[in-house]
Image: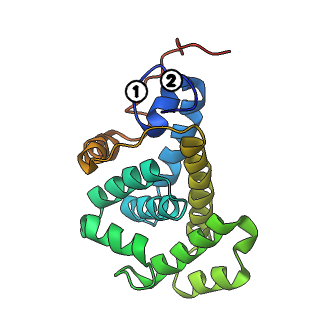
């Protein structure tokens, strides 16, 4: 049961976005740029970073959502997502992505946990400054998204099919395609 009265029973961040659509637009815009915008990292790889950070934060809704979004865009599907979230050191990902996941995990622990060694290791595997930047920002943004979703006690469906259904919409049409831009009409103090 959410900690505040929401105007809909939509799960996770979708219900929160319906409660306050004026904040949904910039947050969806950030997700669109980071996870779907031009990048040398694939959309699936960026979603995998988001799913991994969300798993570290134990945010069931965000982890399940972005795991489904990553699986829909990675040839290896959900099995790769599962292996990566369980242990990125042994997951069958590229050395560059593994180094970026190490950076993401450091960000999840705290921004000052990212060391020059993390960055040097990622560069040694071919990561660009933009890829390092975006990894840090994806990890930091998902720490915020995870705390937003869990801090307001939102609902997370148990059925993986619920996340897979939204994944098709997000993969095809992008972030913001599942939430209305209409004015908020629910109660607020």
Secondary element under disc 1, as helix, strand or loop, is loop
| Residue of label 2 | 6
Above or below, 55 against 94 in this view is: above
| Residue of label 1 | 9
| Residue 27: image tag | none
| Residue 88 left/right relative to 112 | left
- The image quarter containing residue 41 is bottom left
| Residue 64 left/right relative to 165 | right
The residue lying at 47 percent from left, 79 percent from top is 98
The residue lying at 25 percent from left, 70 percent from top is 76
Q: Residue 182: horizontal and vertical position, in percent? A: 48, 16
- The image quarter containing residue 120 is bottom right
Residue contact between numbered discs 2 and 1, judged by CB atoms under 8 Å? yes
| Residue 66 left/right relative to 26 | left
Q: Residue furthest front?
A: 1
- Disc 1 crowd rating (10 Å Cα; few below 14, some 14-19, many 20+) is some
Q: Quadrant for the C terminus, please.
A: top right
The residue lying at 46 percent from left, 30 percent from top is 15
Q: Residue 110: horizontal and vertical position, in percent? A: 70, 66
- The image quarter containing residue 85 is bottom left
């Amino acid at each position: 049961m959410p900690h505040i009265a929401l105007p809909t029973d939509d799960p996770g961040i979708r219900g929160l976005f319906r409660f306050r659509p004026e904040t949904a637009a910039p947050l969806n815009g950030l997700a669109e740029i980071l996870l779907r915008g031009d990048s040398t990292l694939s959309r699936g790889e960026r979603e995998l970073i988001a799913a991994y950070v969300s798993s570290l934060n134990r945010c069931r809704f965000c982890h399940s959502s972005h795991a489904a979004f990553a699986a829909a865009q990675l040839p290896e599907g959900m099995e790769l997502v599962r292996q990566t979230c369980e242990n990125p050191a042994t997951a069958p990902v590229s050395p560059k992505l593994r180094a970026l996941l190490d950076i993401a995990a450091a960000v999840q622990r705290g921004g000052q946990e990212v060391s020059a060694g993390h960055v040097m290791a990622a560069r040694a595997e071919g990561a660009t400054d933009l890829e390092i930047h975006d990894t840090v920002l994806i990890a930091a943004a998902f720490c915020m998204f995870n705390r937003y979703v869990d801090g307001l006690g939102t609902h997370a469906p148990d059925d993986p099919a619920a996340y897979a259904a939204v994944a098709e919409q997000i993969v095809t049409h992008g972030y913001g395609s599942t939430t209305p831009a209409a004015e908020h009409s629910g109660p607020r103090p």
